[in-house]
């Protein structure tokens, strides 16, 4: 099967200009990383702060150009080194950021936030844009009445639902989830993770899930890649990586991580819903 996304040897350097007191330097944030994700699957990318996860997310989402490497979407090569990147290709990959407070424009109503990608990227008439946004609100567990409200009127979990809805408005081939639940309370984390799992099942969505939280990663991944100082030091199926980690860094990372039992949280929420 042709993967939805294939990344080949992606590299990203940041050049930091010098000053009177400091020499110019180059940070090799991502040092040649390759991976594939098939339709309906989730690849998680884990690692400590500064290992290059967000840089990789921004390259895959085509927000930032890469220094070198190749990316194929549905087998078609994307010209990712060039700028500006084609908006057609860019709309195939959407991103949900960590902070639902910062990622939604506070001056725009939810309806405008959801229809904006359709206005920019399609010629869909206004009435249909509204219908699609209403339908998407329901898909993410919100209501039609939320269409005319502003982001500050929502909780963190609801805002993240809006961010997910916005990311899905253009029917992307791939959703990059950059720490999408780490700013939320534990019980809300479980609800948003359940929503992502339901949407994936219903629409056969493909996810790249960026996280430093191994208990969440263990719960939602098909494949896992562990990054360390800009390199992929481990890459394989979830069971391989968690069951038999090969690299010493992965072993240390797993040993140092307290286990949060997401399954137990889910079960508790279910019980509460039924009560
Ligand atoms: N715009 C930038 N200019 C210069 N250096 C940068 C820039 N963005 C990231 N870096 C550097 O690149 C490296 C990787 O950063 P990145 O943010 O991708 O890591 P991360 O794993 O996502 O960390 P975090 O979880 O803290 O966001 C770090 O050394 C960081 O300081």
Image (cartoon, rainbow, N blue to C red):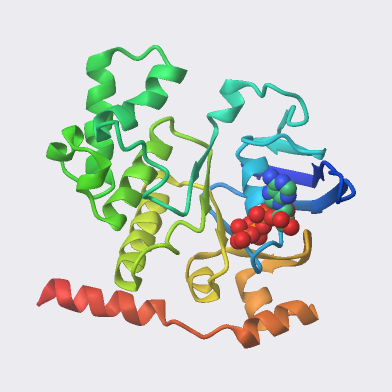
Front one among 48 and 274:
48
Residue 88 point in image, percent of width and height: 57, 22
Front one among 35 and 47:
47
Q: Residue at x 29, y 27 (%)?
A: 112
- Work out which quarter of the rendered image holds the C terminus and state it: bottom left
Question: Relative to residue 43, is residue 121 depicted above or below?
Answer: above
- Which image quadrant for residue 71? top right
Q: Is residue 205 left or right of residue 101?
A: right
Front one among 98 and 164:
98
* Ligand 1 lies in quarter: bottom right
Q: Is residue 53 visible?
A: no
Residue 237 point in image, percent of width and height: 65, 68
Residue 186 point in image, percent of width and height: 35, 72
Front one among 184 and 164:
184
Residue 103 point in image, percent of width and height: 42, 43
Q: Is residue 138 left or right of residue 56?
A: left
Q: Is residue 178 visible?
A: yes
Q: Is residue 85 left or right of residue 95?
A: right
Outermost residue to the front: 20
Question: Relative to residue 27, is residue 272 depicted above or below?
Answer: below
Outermost residue to the left: 275
The image shows a total of numbered marks equal to 0
- Which image quadrant for residue 85? top right
Q: Residue at x 36, y 66 (%)?
A: 189
């Amino acid at each position: 099967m042709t993967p939805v996304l294939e990344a080949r040897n992606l590299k990203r350097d940041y050049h930091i200009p010098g000053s009177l007191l400091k020499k110019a330097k180059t940070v090799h944030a991502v040092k040649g990383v390759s991976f594939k994700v098939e339709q309906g699957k989730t690849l998680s990318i884990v690692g400590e702060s500064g290992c290059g996860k967000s840089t990789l997310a921004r390259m895959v989402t085509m927000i930032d150009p890469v220094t070198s490497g190749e990316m194929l979407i549905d087998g078609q090569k994307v010209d990712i080194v060039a700028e500006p990147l084609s908006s057609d290709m860019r709309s195939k990959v959407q991103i949900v950021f960590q902070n639902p407070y910062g990622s939604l424009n506070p001056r725009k109503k939810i309806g405008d936030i959801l229809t904006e990608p359709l206005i920019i990227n399609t010629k869909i008439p206004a009435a249909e844009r509204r219908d699609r946004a209403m339908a998407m609100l329901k898909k993410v567990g919100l209501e039609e009445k939320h269409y005319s409200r502003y982001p500050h009127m929502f909780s963190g979990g609801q805002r993240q639902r809006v961010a997910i809805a916005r990311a899905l408005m253009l029917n992307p081939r791939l959703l990059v989830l950059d720490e999408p639940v780490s700013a939320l309370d534990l019980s809300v984390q479980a609800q948003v993770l359940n929503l992502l799992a339901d949407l994936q099942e219903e629409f056969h969505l493909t996810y790249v899930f960026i996280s430093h939280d191994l208990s969440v990663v263990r719960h939602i991944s098909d494949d896992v890649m562990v990054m360390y100082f800009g390199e992929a030091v481990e890459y394989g199926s979830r069971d391989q990586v968690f069951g038999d980690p090969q690299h010493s860094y992965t072993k240390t990372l797993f040993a140092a991580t307290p286990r949060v039992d997401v399954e137990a949280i889910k079960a508790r929420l279910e019980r509460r819903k039924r009560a």
